[in-house]
Image (cartoon, helix red, strand yellow):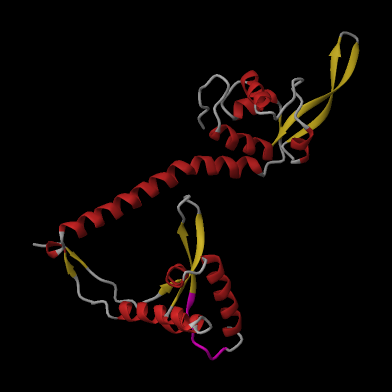
Amino acid sequence: MSSLIPSSNTPATMTSRDVAELTGKRHSDVLRDIRSMIEKLSADADLRWHCETETYIDEQGKPRDMYRMDKDTTLTLVSGYDAVLRFRIIRRWQELEARPTQTFDLATMTGQALRELATKIEECAALNARIITMQPKADFYDHVAGSEALFDRADAAKMLRTGPKRLWASLREWKIVQASGTPYQKFFDMGYFRLVPVLVHKGEYSIPYQQTMVTGKGLAWLKALMDSRVMPTGALVKA
């Protein structure tokens, strides 16, 4: 018995990415045009238009917004485009509406079509694996970056899974901290470090001292930096 893939019976739609591809426009410009159109259409409650927001994953694995529209809404959008671009959209709609609604028998598919299907499945699996791999790093940034806590050298190194001496040696090599161990002023200004006054007790004397602390924002920044650089010993620091 052959395997069957049922086709969808839902009405055809077109995404903002489809429009951008067909017209040669930048996707960001198409999104802007759609938002402007919807703002005008929303002023008339009697109009029946369809435009919903969806999310897709771009080539860098980041979620991005796009719009999905029905035929009338799409044609309304491109009515302000030139004749050539309108014609391309209309031809694509004719292709969408001409697609058969019956099921497809896998036994009749060509070897090339099956290979392309297998490739698409592998790409989806690889993308899902990449998202799962990225999740612990995303959780780290979400948890730490917004924290109001301050971390000394030892605690910062522990959070970054390295040693204090190795961490500060790396920061000196990368021109983030000076030979004295104090970060350069621009990194203080960026909110990555903070100086905290402390007293160092030596015998019967107490000496005031400015201790360098790493902020939550700075810790998240250092984590991203270490993930992309090699430590002085030549070993890559892993998350």
The quadrant holding residue 4 is: bottom left
The quadrant holding residue 159 is: top right
| In this rendering, position of residue 160 left or right of residue 191 | left
Q: Position of residue 27 (x, y in %)?
A: 51, 66
Q: Nearer the viewer, residue 152 or 80?
A: 80
Q: Position of residue 55 (x, y in %)?
A: 48, 62
Up-down: is 229 above or below 33? above
Residue 47 is inside the magenta segment: yes
Q: Quadrant of the N terminus?
A: bottom left
Q: Nearer the viewer, residue 140 or 126?
A: 126
| In this rendering, position of residue 168 left or right of residue 194 | left
Residue range corresponding to the magenta coloring: 45-51
Q: Position of residue 39 (x, y in %)?
A: 60, 80
Q: Residue at x 16, y 57 (%)?
A: 111
Q: Nearer the viewer, residue 84 or 123?
A: 84
Residue sticking out furthest to the top: 203
| In this rendering, position of residue 113 left or right of residue 97 | left
Residue 58 is inside the magenta segment: no
Up-down: is 39 above or below 152? below
Q: Main secondary structure of the magenta part?
A: loop
Q: Position of residue 37 (x, y in %)?
A: 57, 80
Residue sticking out furthest to the left: 1
Counting every numbered tag in the picture gives 0
| In this rendering, position of residue 78 left or right of residue 36 | left
Q: Residue at x 57, y 88 (%)?
A: 45
Residue sticking out furthest to the bottom: 46
Up-down: is 64 above or below 166? below
Q: Nearer the viewer, residue 238 or 148?
A: 238
Up-down: is 81 above or below 165? below
